[in-house]
């Protein structure tokens, strides 16, 4: 049986771990905290149990991916480090003298074993389960927000992407031996991708022929990243696109190409639910899903804290029906009454503009009606008519020959009187102060665990990255709270 493979370790050297891996080591603490057998239970149907040679234990393969996220390493480097780092060996439940896996096995594990597995919900729920067992989650509030992740490809040209990798490698070498400048090949100055790839191959060869350089970890890490980019990602570099990624807007003047991860987090800073979407999706539309996922994970939700993106009419009605307090400030442009084609136009709270279903944002807005009489006022949003003329969705939306395209929203603030009154309460004001916590969590994901840029292409790859990153930050937070 696959689950018994790791338990059958026959080595006279196992006791060495008690001497060289301290009790306060992060990986030892995580091993003691988490029963990773749940990984086997989720993946057992992905393996054949009667034919062929024994597979590499799925728990060990999962732990390799976890180590990649914790220490932000490439496949090659995480395997290389597991050869000599005793804390890695201990965490992976390897005998000290046991050989390591082939790095290519991790790619196969990601593509074949984790396919069709809802890893994101599974890992979030597991950490919430642990937090509840340890009596860490005491609050009955969740904080919601979305964080942006840029697509790995199409941020730069393929050549620029390779130039960055090779530049980082050269910098690492120069810190050790500046004389290597004279031995490196002349840089490629053309826009030809093939010539840039050829340059990188020569650069790699020069460095690998200098054995002393490759012994330095910083050089080796950058060398492996460049090699991995050329070997594994060359097809993506050549097409330079991510077919799932979409353009989203941070403000009216700035946009990004990639994905959004919508997050719910309790006041103790444990992420209780998450969902990954393409970049153009509206934040507020994910609220109901985040609440229901949090409740399913075992969290009691009496209050939801968010920004104005979550105060649209549908969310107010949903939370009222479920006896949940919604601590999100009203925005006259979001919390409207009934609108025509409201499923075709969505409000982007960061930009303060509406976006049509083709992803085009309004270029300006104007308010009409008598000032001070909200029920009679209308906000009119103007779109770039040149884009509308060539839009694939123009039928029924744009009238041929029209000189403008607008979308109008009637302001009906009287519908939200109860929510407006709640906004003025001491409870609302006090709970609003908790919202900063999720912004700090988003920063941790991006700056400590590489969540600012996608590591692969495609929505499935982004979900895997999100699952591992959230699993990591949740476990680290649980350990911190236990120690406190």
Image (cartoon, rainbow, N blue to C red):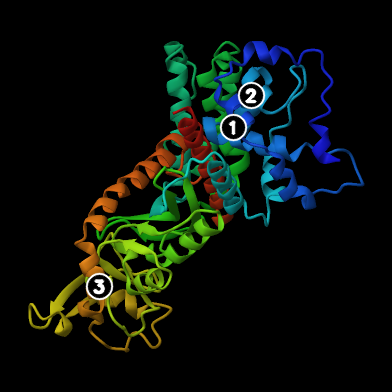
* Depth order, front residue of 134/164: 134
Label 2 sits on residue = 88
Label 3 sits on residue = 418
Question: What secondary structure is found at the residue carrying circle 3?
Answer: helix
Split into 4 quadrants, where in the image is the C terminus?
Answer: top left
Image height check: is 450 above or below 140? Answer: above
Q: Quadrant of residue 226?
A: top right
Residue at left offset 25%, top offset 62%: 329
* Circle 2/circle 1 CB separation < 8 Å: yes
* Depth order, front residue of 322/22: 322
Between discs 1 and 3, the one toward the N terminus:
1
In the image, taking residue 297 as reference, residue 358 lies left or right, namely left
In the image, taking residue 264 as reference, residue 328 lies left or right, namely left
Q: Position of residue 83 (x, y in %)?
A: 68, 20
- Residue at the limit of the structure toward the left, as seen here: 371
Q: Position of residue 98 (x, y in %)?
A: 77, 21
Image height check: is 156 above or below 310? Answer: above
In the image, taking residue 261 as reference, residue 35 lies left or right, namely right
Residue at left offset 53%, top offset 30%: 71
CA separation, marks 1 and 3? Answer: 49 Å
* Badge nearest the viewer, 3 or 2: 3
* Camera sees residue 237: no
CA separation, marks 3 and 2? Answer: 56 Å
Q: Position of residue 264 (x, y in %)?
A: 44, 53
Q: Position of residue 352 (x, y in %)?
A: 24, 65
Image height check: is 423 above or below 39? Answer: below
Label 1 sits on residue = 67
Q: Quadrant of residue 246?
A: bottom left
In the image, taking residue 462 as reference, residue 381 lies left or right, namely left
């Amino acid at each position: 049986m696959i689950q018994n493979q790791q338990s059958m370790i026959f080595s006279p050297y196992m006791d060495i771990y008690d001497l060289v891996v301290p009790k306060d080591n992060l990986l030892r603490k995580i091993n003691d905290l988490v029963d990773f057998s749940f990984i086997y239970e989720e993946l057992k149907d992905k393996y054949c149990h009667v034919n062929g040679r024994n597979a590499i234990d799925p728990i060990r393969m999962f732990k390799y991916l976890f180590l990649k996220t914790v220490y932000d390493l490439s496949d090659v480097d995480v395997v290389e480090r597991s050869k000599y780092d005793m804390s890695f060996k201990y965490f992976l439940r390897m005998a000290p003298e046991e050989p390591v896996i082939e790095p290519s096995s991790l790619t196969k594990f990601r593509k074949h074993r984790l396919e069709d597995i809802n890893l994101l919900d599974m890992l979030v729920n597991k950490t919430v389960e642990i937090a509840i067992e340890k009596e860490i989650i005491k609050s009955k509030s969740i904080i919601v927000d979305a964080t942006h992740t840029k697509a790995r490809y199409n941020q730069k040209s393929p050549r620029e992407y390779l130039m960055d990798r090779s530049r980082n490698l050269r910098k690492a070498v120069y810190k050790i031996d500046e004389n290597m400048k004279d031995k490196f090949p002349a840089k490629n100055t053309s826009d030809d991708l093939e010539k840039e790839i050829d340059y990188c191959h020569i650069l790699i060869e020069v460095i690998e022929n200098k054995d002393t350089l490759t012994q330095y970890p910083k050089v080796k890490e950058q060398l492996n990243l460049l090699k991995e980019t050329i070997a594994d990602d060359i097809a993506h570099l050549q097409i330079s696109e991510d077919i799932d990624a979409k353009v989203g807007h941070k403000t009216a003047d700035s946009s990004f190409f990639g994905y959004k991860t919508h997050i719910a987090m309790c006041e103790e800073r444990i992420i209780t639910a998450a969902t990954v979407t393409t970049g153009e999706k509206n934040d507020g539309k994910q609220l109901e899903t985040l609440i229901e996922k949090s409740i399913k994970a075992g969290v009691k939700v009496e209050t939801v804290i968010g920004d104005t993106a979550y105060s649209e009419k549908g969310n107010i009605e949903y939370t009222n029906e479920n006896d949940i307090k919604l601590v999100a400030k009203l925005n006259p442009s979001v919390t409207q009454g009934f609108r025509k084609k409201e499923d075709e136009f969505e409000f982007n709270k960061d930009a303060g503009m509406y976006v049509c279903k083709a992803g085009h944002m309004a270029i300006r807005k104007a308010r009409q009606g008598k000032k001070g009489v909200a029920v009679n006022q209308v906000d009119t949003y103007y779109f770039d008519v040149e884009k509308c003329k060539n839009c694939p969705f123009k039928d029924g939306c744009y009238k041929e020959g029209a000189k403008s395209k607008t979308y109008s929203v009637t302001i009906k603030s009287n519908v939200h009187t109860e929510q407006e009154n709640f906004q003025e309460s001491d409870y609302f004001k006090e709970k609003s102060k908790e919202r900063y916590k999720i912004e700090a969590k988003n920063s941790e994901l991006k700056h400590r665990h590489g969540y600012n840029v996608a590591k692969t292409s495609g929505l499935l790859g982004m979900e895997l990255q999100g699952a591992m990153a959230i699993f990591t930050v949740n476990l680290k937070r649980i350990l911190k709270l236990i120690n406190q």
